[in-house]
Image (cartoon, rainbow, N blue to C red):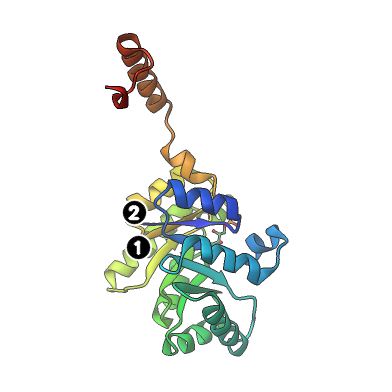
Amino acid sequence: MLLILDTANVDAIKHAMEYYPIDGVTTNPSIIARRHSDFWGLLKEIRQIIGEDKMLHVQTTQKTAEKIVEEALLLKKELKGSIYVKIPISEEGLKATMQLKKLGVCVTMTAIFTPAQALIAAKAGADFVAPYVNRLDNILGDGTEVVAQIVKLFKLHGISSKVLAASFQNAEQVHKCAMYGCDSVTISEDIPKTLISHPMTDKAVEGFNKDWNSAYGEKTILDF
Ligand code: E4P
């Protein structure tokens, strides 16, 4: 399962690149706006941190297919490497996706809330479809169940598009998506730590250290 970071915070990206097996970065206009930075400067810095082999998903701000295509080509040219243009699902977005696929541009169709939207996005050629888990949970929906249905639909119909589950509030939602066979998740910078933390782990390590120190004091294996 691909693990992608949903942030434009360069310090958080540097940290995650050093400590976690991260496959790339996703952004959206809200995430970028939160940084109050120069757009190209910020995106190019992120590209430089993650390198050209890791995925960078950047969302278009355009509304018509013609302009979406124009912006997508510019994003691909400027940001180089593994670039995915995020396009919210709409008629114009689908038209742009079909054109971009012919031009060899990778697309992540985003703001997906139903399996039907995911199916049409995949048929238009989207490489990834991004269902929003927590936003569905927030309106008394079942975000991970929608992800499960999309995964099942894609398997049933032999669809090669990947499911990039997005919009998470907690580690349990991420875990459920993984259990449902979801291809990839994009998570905020706080979630990696919650995925690896457990009080029993801390307790186990504390016990190992205590036993070791009682026999060997402060010596480590390097001192023998
Ligand atoms: C996904 O493509 C979006 O960037 C994102 O995951 C939305 O998350 P939010 O609901 O926490 O804003």
Q: Amino acid at mark 1?
A: Val
> Mark 1 and 2 residues: CB-CB less than 8 Å, in contact?
yes
Q: What is the x, y in percent for residue 158?
A: 27, 73
Identify the mark at residue 151; answer none if there is no mark.
Answer: 1
What residue is pinned by disc 2?
180
Identify the mark at residue 168; answer none if there is no mark.
Answer: none
- CA gap, disc 1 and disc 2: 7 Å
- Look at the numbered disc 2 and give the secondary structure of its residue: loop
Q: Residue at x 64, y 81 (%)?
A: 63
Q: Amino acid at mark 2?
A: Tyr
The reply to whether residue 103 is in sight is yes
Q: Quadrant of residue 149?
A: bottom left
Q: Residue at x 44, y 59 (%)?
A: 146
Q: Which is more toward the observer, 196 or 16?
A: 16
Q: Determine whether the beta carbon of the residue marked 1 sits less than 8 angstroms from the nearest atom of ligand 1.
A: no
For label 1, the crowd category at 10 Å Cα-Cα, with few meaning under 14, some 14 to 19 and many 20 or more, is many
